[in-house]
Image: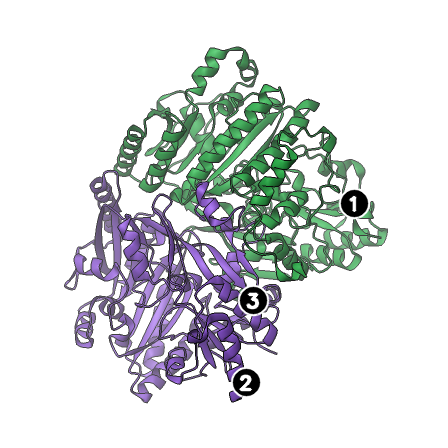
Amino acid sequence: MKPEELQKLPPEVYKELEEVVGPENISEEPALLDGYAWQPTFNSSPDLWVPRCAAAVLPGSTEEVQAVVRICNKHNILYKAHSTGWGTFNAVKAGGIVLDMRRMNRIVEIDEKNMYAVVEPYVSGISLQAELLSRGLNCHMIGAGCGASLLASATSGVGDGWDGISMSYSPRNVLGVEWVLPDGELLQMGSLGSHGTWFSGDGPGPSLRGAMRGWCGAFGGLGVFTRVAVKIFNWPANGDHRSEGLMFDYLPPLPENLKVFMVVFRDRGSFAEGMYKIGEAEIGYIQCRNALGMILGGALPRFQRKLPGVPAMVEMLKSMQFCLTHIIAANSPRELAYQEKALRAIALDSEAFVLDMGQLPLGGLLFWGLVKDSLPPLIFRIGGQFSSVFGHDETWDSSILLNRVGQEIKQKWIDRDGMIDDLADNAWMFLQEDGMWTHCEELILYDPREEKHVRSVNNAIAEAMISAVEHCQGPGFMLLNPMVRRMLSPMMSHYNFWTKKLKKEFDPLGLSDDVAYCSEEDVEEADIDLENMTFDIPPEELARIFEERISVIPAPREMAQ
Amino acid sequence: MAVKAVEDLKERLAGIVGETSVNDDRNDLLQYARPDGDGHLPTCVVRPVNPEQVTALVVLANETGLNLVPVSSGPPHARGGTAPESGAVMVDLSAMDRIVRMDRRNKVAIVEPGVTFGRLASEASKVGLKALMPLLPRQRKSVLASYLEREPIIIPKYHWDATDPLLCMEVVFGTGDMFRTGSAAGPGSLEQQWEHGEAQKNPMGPGQTDFGRLVQGAQGTMGIVTWGSVKLEVMPSEHRIYFVNDSLERLIEFAYPVLRRKMADEFLILDGTAFATTMRGGAAEIGDLAGRIPGYVLVLGISGYEYFPGERVTYLVNDMADLAKEAGVALTRSAAGVDHLEAERALSGPSGEPYYKHRMKGGSRDLFFLTTLDRVPAFTAAMESLAQEHGHPVGEIGTYIQPIQHGRTVHLEFDIYFDPGSAKDAARAGGLFSAAAKACQEMGGFFSRPYGPWADMAFEACPDTVDALLKVKRVLDPRGVMNRNKLCFKEA
C-alpha cells in the first residue's frame, strides 16, 4: 500500500509510537484529528479543510522525535512536523501522521553578551521577546504574528517581518541547528556539531544551512528541526513596559528615546526615492508600509466595508497612499535627535511629510503593536480571510514595480466585486538590513463564505504569479505549490531539479511530506477548478511570457538525457 | 602522468581554451604549489576566459576523470586550499576579470573571479561606493575567492550573516551543469532582470535550497564560480579612525555594547605585533612599534553619510566616549605614535608589498577559527603558553580579533611569523602551529573553514556533518572531479 493510501495506522504501528511518546501524547480520535484538518488560511478550497491525518503524535524531546521518525521509516509512513501550525502547508498528505511539536516549548538558553537564544519549536516570538526586553534585547518577529514559532520561520518557513531593517530575515538569523534528518539520524550543524556550542551555523566547509532551506524552507519536507539558535538584537529601552487593558483600549506610553512616525510620500516616485535615502542613512528600527486601507480595515472593519460608498473619503485616503510607519529606537538622546533630524530632512527632500504619532492618542498602540507584532491578526477582522501574493525580496525599485502591478490586478477584481475593496493597493513593504534588499507582498482581503470571492482570489493569485514572471520577479510564496514549481523551475535555473536530488539523498524513502517542498504536479493533475478560472490573459499571451522567461541556463544534462 | 598522456590531455584542453591558454611549464606551475614546497605540482594549468569554456572543462573532467582545481588569486597560495594533488589540472580564472556591472543605486557589483580588491575598490569609489574588504588583502587576492572562503570583513556592522558580502553567483557544478543562485536564477536573464529593476541582491534560494551556501566554503569542491554579485556600501561623507589601547579584558567590555548598537564601521582588535605589522613596513620599525604597545589596540572607524555627516560622527563619538568611560578605557586619535591618518590609509586598501604578514620575518603560518569575544582571552593565554613551550618568541605572533555577524562571533587569528630561509625557524613555527591548532580545537575553537591538516581534525569532530556533506557532494559533484581530497571529501 502506498503511504498516502493509508487512512488509519496499523495497530502495531500505533503501539510502537505510543511506546515512544506515551499514551497521552498520541491520538487517532477523529474529533481530535479534525482540529488539525481545519486550515482556512491559504486554503484555495472553498470548504477550508485539509485531509484528516492518520494520527497526531506529540514528541517531547529530540530523542522521541528521532524514534518517531525511525518508526515512520520502518513502516513506510508519511509524516510532517509543525510547530504553531498556521496555514495549509502544515497539513500532511492523506495517510500521514502529524508531529505536533507543542511539548517542545523551552527557551533553552539566552546568551545576552553574544546575542543569541536557543529555542525549541513551540517557542513563539512573543514568549522569547517577553524574556528579552527586560534584558535590553529583542528578537525578529515575523509577519505571521507574535504567536508564530521562531524555529519554524528560521528553519522551515519564510520569515519576513517589519523589523527587517534592523533585524533582518529569519533564515539569515540562524546559528547552530539541531536537525532530525528524514531517516531519523541527528545532525547538529555548525559549532554545535563540533563543540556543543551554538554561536555558528556554518561549516566546517560548505554550510549545510544551504541544504536546510533557501529563500523559503522545506515546510516539513526534510525531517524535523528540534532546536535552533537564533540571533537576538539590541533593544535600547529601559524599564518595565507593562500596559493595562485590551487591544484598542489602552494607551501605553512610549519608552524614552523611542519614537514612531508616519511618513506620507507624495506619490510612488517620491516613495521610491525616499526609501533609498532612508536605507543609506542607516536610520530606523522597525518600519513598514501598510496601506491605509489595511490600517483602516483592521481598526474599523465595518467602516471599511462602507467606504466604496463614500468616494470623497476614498479620494482623501488615496492621497495618502504611500504612507510609511517608521520607528526610531535610539540608544541616547543624541542619537534620537540625529535620526529624527535625518528622517525629517529625507522626507523634505522626497516631498513627504512626517507625523510624530507619539503625539497622537493611537501612537502608543501603533508603536507597541509593531514592536510586539500583535497587529497581524487584525487582518482577519475585515473579511474573515486573506491571501498574499508575490512575497518578493530584491531591490526597492523592484518592490515598487510589484506594488504598482499588484494594485492594477487587484483593482480589476475589486471592480468585479471579487474581493474586499481595500483601496486596491495593499502592499506590505519594507527595507531589509538597512536597505540591502527589500520585501514586498500584496495582500488580498476576502470573505471565504462568498463563493465569488474564493474564485476571484484564485484568479488574482494566478494572474499575480504570471505578472511576476513577466516582470522578472521571483514568484515568492507560489513556489509552495507543486504545480507552480513544475511550471517555473525551468525559468529559474531548473532549481527544483537540484532540490529534488538533495531530497532523494537525504530522504531516500520520501516519507517527510514534500508537498510544499519539491514535489511537482502537472496542471492536469492539480486540484484546481480550471472551468471556473476566468483568466484575463489570453493563452497565446501566456505562452509568450513563459517562452520569453525560459532560463538562459541550459537544463541539467541528466534531465536532458 | 606519461608524456603521451600529458600531450593528449593538453590537446583536449587546448581544444576548449585555445593552445596559448594551456601551460605545463614547470616555472609557471610552481606558482600554484604550496610556498613551503610541500605537496605536488599540477600537470598543467588552463586559463579559461568565459563560462562556456569553464563548463566545457568540467564536462571533459566528468568524461575523463580529471581533477580540476579552480584558483583565482595570484600566488602565494599559503593555506593549501588550492594546493593540487598529483595529476591535477589548475583552472586559473584570473583572466576572467571583468566588473560586469556597477550599480550605485542598489549598492552592488557583479564581478568575475579575476577581479582583485584594489580594482573593485577603485571602481566602486568612482560612483561613491566602497568595497567591503578583509584586513589588508594581498594585492592579487581575488574578491570572489575571499568571499567564497568566508574571510571576515573588517566592518562587522555590514556583516549580517556568514555569507556576506557575497550575494548571487553563477556556478558550474561538478556535474558540468551551469546554475545561478539567489534571485539571479530567474525568471529572466541578467539583462531582463536589470530592465525590471532587479540587481541580483537576494542571495537565498532560489526556492527551498540555498545553493550559494553549498558552494561557499567548499574550496572549489562543488563547482567553479564564474561571477558573483557583491555588496558594496556608501562611501562615507565623513570618516574618522579612533584607537583604544588597553588590556584585552577591558577592550572586550567596551566592545560588546558598541557592537550591539552597530555604532562603528571598521572594528578590529590587534595585539602589538599585529598592529605593528599592519601599520609599519620594515622588521625594525615593526619591532620598535610593537614594543611600545602595551596590551591590545582596538581600531574603529566612525562614519557620517549624506545627511548631516558631521552630526552623525559627533553623536557617535560622544556616545562611544560615554561607553568608554564606563569600561575604563579611552578613545584616542593615535596609538604609540601611529595617528589616525596612517591607520586610515593602511586600512583603506590592499596590503602594500611586502604582504603585511611577511614584513616581520618573511613568512607566516596562520591559524584561525571562530569563537565568541568572551572566550578570546582563554585562547590568547593558551597560545602564549604554547609559544613559550615551543621556544617561539611571543612577540613574533600576531593576534588578530575580528568580530563578525555584528559581534556574535569572532574570527580569532594567530599569525606565527618565521623566517622561511631558516629550516629551524620554519620547523619551530610549524610545530607550534600544529600544537596550537590541536589545543584551540580542544578548547572549542570552531574551524569553520579548515585547510589541509586542520580539515581532518575539524571533520573528525562532527561525523554527522561529514555524512550530510557527502550527500551534497553526491548531488553537485558525483564523480568527484572538483579539487579532489580536500575537506572531508577524501577518496576511498
Report the mark closest to the observer, 1 or 2. Answer: 2
Total numbered labels: 3
- Give the labeled residue for mark 2: B5
Report which quarter residue A183 is drawn in.
bottom right
- Give the labeled residue for mark 3: B174
User: Same chain for marks 3 and 2?
Assistant: yes
Which chain can be seen in purple? B
**Mark 1 secondary-structure assignment:** loop
User: Same chain for marks 1 and 2?
Assistant: no
Q: Disc 3 and disc 2: Cα gap in Å?
A: 23 Å
Q: Disc 1 and disc 3: Cα gap in Å?
A: 42 Å
Check the residue under mark 2 and report the chain it is in.
B
Which chain can be seen in green? A
**Mark 2 secondary-structure assignment:** helix
The picture places residue B407, in percent across and down from the top left corner, at 38, 54
Residue A307 visible (yes or no): yes
Q: Callout 3, which amino acid?
A: Gly
- Give the labeled residue for mark 1: A54
**Mark 3 secondary-structure assignment:** loop
Residue A372 visible (yes or no): no
Quarter holding the C terminus of chain B is: bottom right
Query: A20 or B468, which lies in front?
Result: B468
Horizontal side, residue B387 vs residue A555: left or right: left
At horizontal 27% and vertical 76% (from top left) the residue drawn is B396
Q: Are marks 3 and 2 in contact (CB under 8 Å)?
A: no
The picture places residue B259, in percent across and down from the top left corner, at 34, 51
Q: Callout 1, which amino acid?
A: Ala
Check the residue under mark 3 and report the chain it is in.
B
